[in-house]
Image: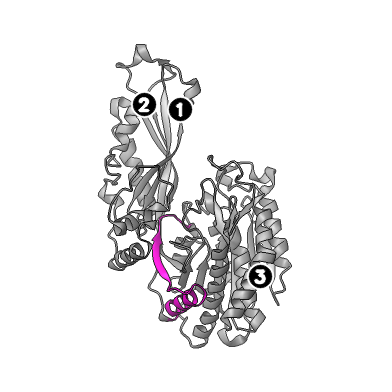
Amino acid sequence: MDTAKVDRYVAEKWDDDIVPQLVEYIRIPNKSPMFDKDWVANGYMEQAVQLMERWAKAQPVPGMQVEVIRLEGRTPLIFIEVPASGPETGADTVLLYGHLDKQPEMTGWDDDLGPWVPVIKGDKLYGRGGADDGYAIFGSLAALQALQQQGVPHARCVVLIEACEESGSYDLPAYVDHLADRIGKPSLVVCLDSGCGNYEQLWCTTSLRGLAGGNFTVKVLEEGVHSGDASGVVPSSFRLLRQLLSRLEDEQTGRILPDGLQAEIPAARVSQAQEAARVLDTAVFDKFPFLPGMTPMAEDLAELVLNRTWRPALSVTGVDGMPPLSSAGNVLRPYTSVKLSLRLPPTLEGKQAGQLLKDLLEKDSPNGAQVSLDLEKASTGWNAPAMSPWLENAIDASSREFFGKPAMYMGEGGTIPFMGMLGEKFPGAQFMITGVLGPHSNAHGPNEFLHIPMGKKVTACVARVIAEHHAASVRGETTGVAAVAGGEQHGDHGCC
């Protein structure tokens, strides 16, 4: 494989074809079903699917089959099959994954930016969903085209692009079971929905945290009452909620208290965290828009990496029962509700953690208040299997060739539901989990952007790894995969 030709082809493909497509994709407010209950009637998801389907079908890839699969009552899924370039790899398969649904708008965008307003500034494309994860289908097919342009062989490839990842991928298990025979036996899974510690080398994700959470409500009254009359007699719902959350979290340090929500961190992951901290230095924390004078939760950089990748952590991401400041009278409110997002260690079983959380918060309510936790998510994380020598060598070589620096490995704090599912279904598969969400890219938040040069280089690296997979497959080094098991039942896998 001529690295320079791949680099040049991918760069031109991005500039001339992929970026213009992503500009149009960003314009579509195709929010994930959790954030748009009328997604079918609104039709935005269908617009995004059609945009990607049209583009994929227009690509000159010999033998490629592009199909939108629609199971009744579920979000659609784009299924693409690219045949092997020769018979040498037999039924061996590479599975490439991404998603096309988006997070909601969020406030705080700069005046000249917006979630559905694509803006290119320098080497960044701003707007919701370009990096998370609209580029995946374009990058996947561009990587294969870069190989075919040079006649570099590759195994059979399957591309899956789902439409409810940000809602927990609850539709995906049904599609994986439905398509079991057509998916085949992947020995390599490539996921383009993860992050990177910097934009200077290839980063591969070694673990993902799980997620448990939902709407937590504390009720004390049938209706609001005069605060001067009731305070000191009626317990504040906010105070009781705060008291209950103290069962879960040390408010001084943020440490999650129950032993049942902790997990031992493998020694290899500790070593990777230390190396990542060494390379990133203060970028471990200063990639975030801290206010002046704010400090991170620990001084040790490796501990910060472990905090965001292997330790449980609580975020309160929404609130209800509180009027805005402009209309807040002297009223003792009847209830307070918050949305809890509890990140879990990668190896902790999600449903068990969700039940522990529910029991912890609902039992023995103070002052007899009505307390309820409506669990929306209870997902297990993912810890990567040991990497085969061929894949480790291929990933590092691709990073050195296209970035000029060695590859790096680090866990991610978010959740990619598909990974835990695939880990169960393909226990013998190898995983290359990577992405373009680096410093300040701010996925899910305001001013989200796609770093275009990173997208190009990740695409080129994927091409290199797929080429090396073919060689390893011919040598018999990718054996040991397990076929998809049809008809299995799956729980909620949580969302990113």
Would you identify the image quadrant in which residue 23 lies? bottom right
Q: Residue at x 51, y 83 (%)?
A: 473
Please report contact status of discs 1 and 3: CB closer than 8 Å, yes or no.
Answer: no
Q: Which label was assigned to residue 163?
A: none
- Return the x and y of residue 93 as percentages of the image width and height: 55, 76
Q: Residue furthest top?
A: 229
Is 227 covered by the magenta stretch? no
Name the one closer to the observer, 414 or 90: 414
Residue at screen point 53% across, 51% down? 166
Q: Is residue 12 visible?
A: yes
* Whole-percent x, y for residue 371 in the image: 37, 32
The type of residue carrying mark 1 is: Gly
Cα–Cα gap, marks 1 and 3: 52 Å
The image shows residue 197, relative to residue 88, as above or below, that is above
- Taking 14 as reference, is 426 left or right? left
Task: Check residue 411 for magenta coloring.
Answer: yes
Q: Earlier in the sequence, mark 2 or mark 3?
A: 3
Q: Are marks 2 and 1 in contact (CB under 8 Å)?
A: yes
Give the residues in magenta.
390-416
| Amino acid type at image mark 2 | Ser
User: Mark 1 = which residue?
Assistant: 321
According to the picture, the residue beneath numbered tag 2 turns out to be 237
Which image quadrant is residue 370 in?
top left
